[in-house]
Image (cartoon, grey):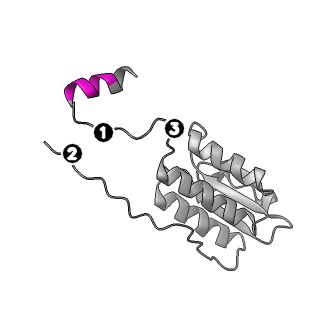
Amino acid sequence: RKITDALKQRFPLMQFPPKGDICYATQNRQNAVKQIAKDAELILIVGSKESSNSNRLVDVARAAGAKAYLINDHNEINPEWLKSVNTVGVSSGASAPEYVVAEVIQHLKQLGVQSVTETITAIEKVKFAMPKI
């Protein structure tokens, strides 16, 4: 609150999103996890344990009926999780670097995953315009 008040004083024309608004990227990821969970028996969410949006993705996956784990990187994948699993879904929190997700997928291939299919549930075309001065 203090930060936004200071920003409003310094930049009076600054516009803020509605208070109840969820970040579009976070909402898109939650929607994607719900979609993936329809087919995946296991979902791995790449992200930090301190990330609220990553933790929420795990909750969304579990609520949709999939086993789900939050991992920082491929080193945290337990091969036991993959036993008797035919389909693994992978998603990530908003701040997880893309290369870490790619490493997770590569590691899954080394563990025996035979094919990878990308599921696109939303195309993000959001652009942030500079404020008028």
Please provide percent x and percent y for residue 75: 63, 53
Please provide percent x and percent y for residue 16: 35, 38
Please provide percent x and percent y for residue 62: 76, 51
Which residue is painted at 44% across and 39% down in the image? 18
Residue type at mark 3: give it.
Gly
45 left or right, relative to 98: right
Please give the residue where the numbered disc 3 appears in the rendered image. Answer: 20
Please give the residue where the numbered disc 1 appears in the rendered image. Answer: 15
Label 3 Cα crowd, 10 Å radius (few <14 / some 14-19 / many 20+): few
Q: Are marks 2 and 1 in contact (CB under 8 Å)?
A: yes
Q: Which span is picked out in magenta?
A: 5-10
Mark positioned earlier in the residue sequence (3 or 1): 1
Q: Which mark is residue 131?
A: 2
Residue type at mark 1: give it.
Gln
Q: Nearer the viewer, residue 59 or 110?
A: 59
35 left or right, relative to 29: right
Q: Secondary structure at mark 2?
A: loop
Mark positioned earlier in the residue sequence (3 or 2): 3
Q: Secondary structure at mark 3?
A: loop
Identity of the residue furthest to the left in this view: 133
Which residue is painted at 79% across and 64% down in the image? 41
Please provide percent x and percent y for residue 14: 26, 36
Q: Nearer the viewer, residue 34 or 114?
A: 34
Q: Secondary structure at mark 1?
A: loop
